[in-house]
Amino acid sequence: MGHTQDITPPRDPDVVNRLVDTPRGGRAGGEPGDTVLLLGGARSGKSTLAVDLAKRFGGAVTYIATAEPGDDEMAARIVNHRRQRPSQWTTVEEPLDIATAIGEVPPGECVVLDCLTLWVSNLLGDGVTSAEIYDRAADTAAVAATHRSPVITVSNEVGSGLVPTTNLGRVYRDVLGGVNQIWADATDRVYLLVAGRALELSRLTGSGGLGL
């Protein structure tokens, strides 16, 4: 159990302030809310930043968790994540049908989805094909884009490490990379986190240039 202790580092408030205060068109009223995707490796600060951003929202928050306590270590990790969240937030544990979970969140309530990484793993473990996962990702991202308050999504970037030694590992790496691209295409802002620092990623235009 020594590996499951909470080692979350202190946050740099400047990172949160820059993300929250950057104007993106001022969505309000009955219009869809801003969508944010936070990508990064393990312990890069993704989940902590997602919680910080949702706290700054100032209203009700629903936290959709895709993790399942498959063993003692994962169960302890889930407990640590819960401790980081305000007790008044609503937590929905949904390992597979996140589109329905997002759709059932009341308008005006911020959503934190943590995370696509385990969602893809759960679907593959449930026998869902890669093609169907891509379809579900597109449909779910569309649901998130129409929600009437911010949706903050967390996912891992797993394509920068060693090539997995098993076929399943390579399939997982490739499918998650595809899902991240699908989600990013439907998202207003995408950030890559490294060591608790966030870098905004530019959108590519149809002609292949950067959308600056």
Image (cartoon, rainbow, N blue to C red):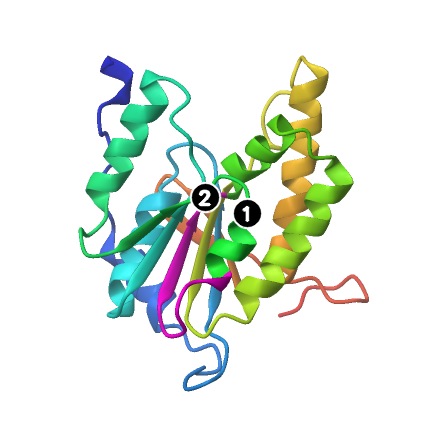
Q: Point out residue 50 in the picture as x, y percentages from the top left corner.
A: 36, 52
Q: Are marks 1 and 2 in contact (CB under 8 Å)?
A: yes
- Label at residue 146: none
Horizontal side of 81 relative to 197 (left or right) equals left
Q: Is residue 203 above or below residue 174?
A: below
- Image point (37%, 74%), residue name: 108
Q: Amino acid at mark 2?
A: Glu
Rendered image quadrant of residue 109:
bottom left
Horizontal side of 139 relative to 4 (left or right) equals right
**Which span of residues is magenta-colored?**
103-115
Residue placed under numbered mark 2 in the picture = 94
Q: Is residue 46 visible?
A: yes
Horizontal side of 196 relative to 130 (left or right) equals left
Q: Quadrant of the C terminus?
A: bottom right
- Image point (27%, 21%), residue name: 4
Residue placed under numbered mark 1 in the picture = 97
Q: Residues within 10 Å of mark 2 (few under 14, many from 20)?
A: some
- Image point (25%, 56%), residue name: 89
Residue in front for this viewpoint, 25 or 86? 86
Q: Is residue 188 visible?
A: no
Q: Point out residue 129 in the picture as x, y percentages from the top left corner.
A: 74, 35
Mark 1, secondary structure of its residue: loop
Rendered image quadrant of residue 26:
bottom left
Label tally: 2
Q: Quadrant of the N terminus?
A: top left
Mark 2, secondary structure of its residue: loop
Q: Residues within 10 Å of mark 1 (few under 14, many from 20)?
A: some
